[in-house]
Amino acid sequence: METVEMNSVSLKRPRSEDDVANADEIKRQKILEKSKAGNDSGQSIENITEQPADTKSEIIPNEDSEEQEEEELEDSDEDGDPESFADMMKHGLTESDVGITKFVSSHKGFSGILKERYSDFVVHEIGKDGRVSHLDDFSVPVDDEDPSEETFTVLSDEDKQRLEELQLFKNKETSVAIEVIEDTKEKRTIIHQAVKSLFPGLETKTEDRDGKKYIIAYHAAGKKALANPRKHSWPKSRGSYCHFVLYKENKDTMDAINVLSKFLRVKPNIFSYMGTKDKRAITVQEIAVLRITAQRLAHLNKCLMNFKLGNFSYKNHPLKLGELQGNHFTVVLRNITGTDDQIEQAMNSLREIGFINYYGMQRFGTTAVPTYQIGRAILQNNWNEVMDLILKPRPGAEKGYLVKCREEWAKTKDPAAALKKLPVKRCVEGQLLRGLLKYGMKNIISAFGIIPRNNRLMYIHSYQSYVWNNMVSKRIEEYGLRAVPGDLILKGATAVHIEEGDVDKYTIHDVVMPLPGFDVIYPKHKIGEAYKEMLVADNLDINNMRHKIRDYSLSGAYRKIIIRPQNVSWEVVAYDDPKIPLFTTDLDKLEGKPLPVLPTDGKFRALKMEFSLPPSTYATMAIREVLKMDTSIKNQTQLNTTWLR
């Protein structure tokens, strides 16, 4: 098995309607919308795999919340000619910038279009028991204690608004009175049930006022009741957690949970899941929620956009992050140029050898300041550099208000003035500026600590990934695709070196390499020294990876250098219309939608591939190995734009 250097294979195509829809992924100044409308570039490959469990949630630092995405973007500077998106992306990263330089297969690469439609990319979660999650049942478990359907319609919109304000302490009222029209005991019972089930934390009683019956809603136990649904209202015989399958389209996991929380009027933290899934895809995963009935959840299917809930069951446990076995992917690469022989070679290689287990481009951010640089500055204890990297002006595609915020910061170094330029403060820049405003410029450590922990750790994990990618490329260049003395393998959870006499017992698929940390060992060959040299060049000591701030101490971990996907299958299909789906989803099957009839000799060819990957691996890297192409936004945008000129 030989290794080959990366070449560049273009992902050439014009912009499709779905690409325009994807503008909410990297929103830019309005002036860039004109260049998109002008048909100037193709869609890039994006974050398309399970978010690795060790970081809980990989959050690109400049990716804002859904509310921010809905903010009106400001106009860019109208002086001079605006840069095209391709010109702006010249400042982004390529794969070689983050150590991704090798392939394991020798076939000739070919081009194809990934995610021309988000429905071309489907992810099914694989649970810890090996079961693949599917949405195939909308029925609700029969439960005599469930409220009647009338519970969901008995309250008027005005009543619901007043009850929500009471529940969330949004006004000074201590209670809400609901007049019982057509007074009967049954009607009063339904209203009592509706208030208690739809508005956790509220209790009810019946009162006579001027000869009329009223249901009075009031707080049961202060503000804590909202976060902790009432225990006494849940049947003891029923599991405390309702597990269900979440099917979502073009929405990330946390966005979906936030929407469910709003509809159910509960806190998002009562939901649990095994892994976060990407936005620009169709994904199917298991979710658990504390003391919300399947009936209430199923009722949401009538009003939810872009996702559905089903396969309900009650259990006594929540879900834990990282408990999954992995994900099963169904991917369509459209308009492929490869011959049948090339495709056969590429897919056989993927099945038999696998791909290099690089951390994908999404691990390192999408702007001119890579996340690993910020992580390196944190590990160096260089807090002025951390502040500067996050807040300084940077070239490339960014939202107009962020550009103005950075310019203000560079000009004044005044956190209050820079903060005024941000319409919404939830982005990392806004959080850091708030911290500087609170703690002062001489206490950057505390100011940085305002940023949520997962986001802060994302930076140092990015640096670990950067080192790992570079070291793996060196390892493969030096020793190829065979196990050699001094390599590391895992025996249980313990890493040991391969001795000279044992080398024939192992293959490249057994070899692991460390992410740098205080609790790992390094290879006993040239690559062990290369780790030290790389960290010395970054002013870090490989023998002292403990940080004076405990959160930023790196224990390290081990990662296989080659991943061989499981359950690999593929077929080449012909099609004429780029807008038609090429396979049926779970929802299509539930709704009885037939697969469109495809021509035997269409204008275009597509490669439909399926494979399963373990957690913390990147499907982009598997697809990169098949196509032999750079998956960076920078490379694809420039190649596509050049082709279209």
Image (cartoon, helix red, strand yellow):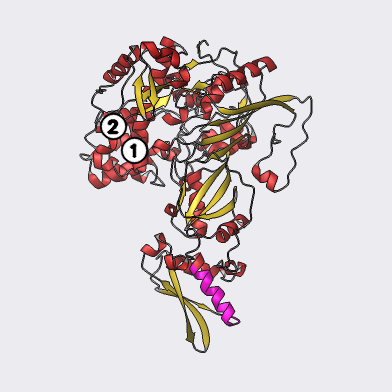
Q: Is 575 displayed left or right of 451 in the figure? A: right
Q: Dot 2 corresponds to which residue? A: 378
Query: At 25% from the left edge and 32% from the top edge, which residue is drawn?
Result: 384
Q: Position of residue 471 (x, y in %)?
A: 38, 18
Disc assigned to residue 621? none
Q: Which residues are magenta?
A: 181-196
Q: Position of residue 226 (x, y in %)?
A: 41, 62
Badge 2: how crowded within 10 Å, few (<14), some, or many (20+)? many
Q: Is residue 607 visible?
A: no
Real-space Cα separation, disc 1 to disc 2, in angstroms:
9 Å
Query: At 36% from the left edge and 67% from the top edge, which residue is drawn?
Result: 222
Principal SS element in the magenta part?
A: helix
Q: Amino acid at mark 1?
A: Arg
Q: Dot 1 corresponds to which residue? A: 456
Name the N-terminal-most of marks 1 and 2.
2
Q: Amino acid at mark 2?
A: Ile
Q: Note whether 193 is above or below 250 in the view shown.
A: below
Q: Position of residue 314 (x, y in %)?
A: 52, 56
Closer to us: 19 or 287: 287
Closer to us: 308 or 521: 521
Q: Position of residue 112 (x, y in %)?
A: 62, 23
